[in-house]
Every structure is written in C-alpha cells, then in structure tokens.
Amino acid sequence: MHDSEQDTGSGTIAVESEAFLSGSLVEYWDDNGIAVPVWAWMNLLAHGTARQIGECVLRPDAPRRVGRSWRGARSYLAFEVLDLTDVDFTLAELQSSVLIPLELEMAARPDVAGWTPRQWVDLVEGALRNELWAPEQ
C-alpha cells in the first residue's frame, strides 16, 4: 500500500469516527453511497445534540437514498427522546443510560440486519419504557 492510500484510508476512518461521535453517521454513509446498517439508525439518538435531534423531528424526509420509512421511524423516536428529556431526564443521561448501550447492543447483533423500522421502534420504545419505570437506585 502506498503512503497516499494509507493517508486516504486513515482520513476516511477519522471522518467516519467523527461522524459516529457527532451522531451523523447515517448521513455520512448515505452521502457516500455506503449501505446503512440497521444499528446505525441509533447513532443520531445516541450521540446527537438536542438541536440535531430536533432538526430530525422537523425534517425527517430529507431527500436521500435511504428509505423514508427509516427516516420516519427515526423522526418519531427523536420526538419521543426529546419529549422525555423535557421532563424526566437530561439528554446526556438518557444517551448514556439507554441509547448508547442500545446502539452498541444492536451493532453486536447480526439478527438486526433484516429488521424493519417497526421492529427498531419497538425495541427503542421498550428500552425507554424500562428506563422510565426502573426503580431509582
């Protein structure tokens, strides 16, 4: 491998890592023609700011290659997350206690590859409900 190829690969890894940590991995992969795995739809909810998540609620159907059903599901869940953070939790608390662990769990499970948006919504809503009704420790 030539140095320029290594630089390009390293640059791609850095940009993907930045997109992952900022909650914009789906958009990065979609913009670059990369297939978006099901687990990646958790990324915005798990790592995005309240503003980014709110923008997802307001504009769920941005023209992209990825199907509208996934964007609609993410918009619905974004609303749910923001609704919870208005009353019960801070966004950071909800992300660290529920959304990031769920994102990691989904990434490790090969069976989610064939999931529908409805299955994903059901999983996230169940995890959020469990957090709401978990006894305080």
Image (tube, grey):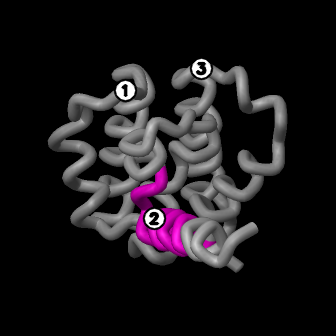
User: Which quadrant of the view contains residue 74?
Assistant: top left
Mark 1, residue position? 65
Disc 1 crowd rating (10 Å Cα; few below 14, some 14-19, many 20+) is: few
Q: Amino acid at mark 1?
A: Arg
Q: In the rendered view, does 24 fall on the left or right side of 104?
A: left
Q: Which residue is mark 3?
A: 116
Figure check: 137 above or below 97: below
Mark 3: which secondary structure?
loop
Q: Are marks 2 and 3 in contact (CB under 8 Å)?
A: no
Callout 2 secondary element: helix
- Amino acid type shown at disc 3: Thr
Few, some or many residues within 10 Å of mark 2 (<14, 14–19, 20+): many
Query: Of 80 and 61, which appears nearest the observer?
Result: 61
Closer to the observer: label 1 or label 3? 1
* Residue 11 painted magenta: yes
Q: Which residue type does callout 2 highlight?
A: Ala
The residue at which mark 2 appears reads as 19
Q: In the figure, is residue 78 to the left or right of 16?
A: left
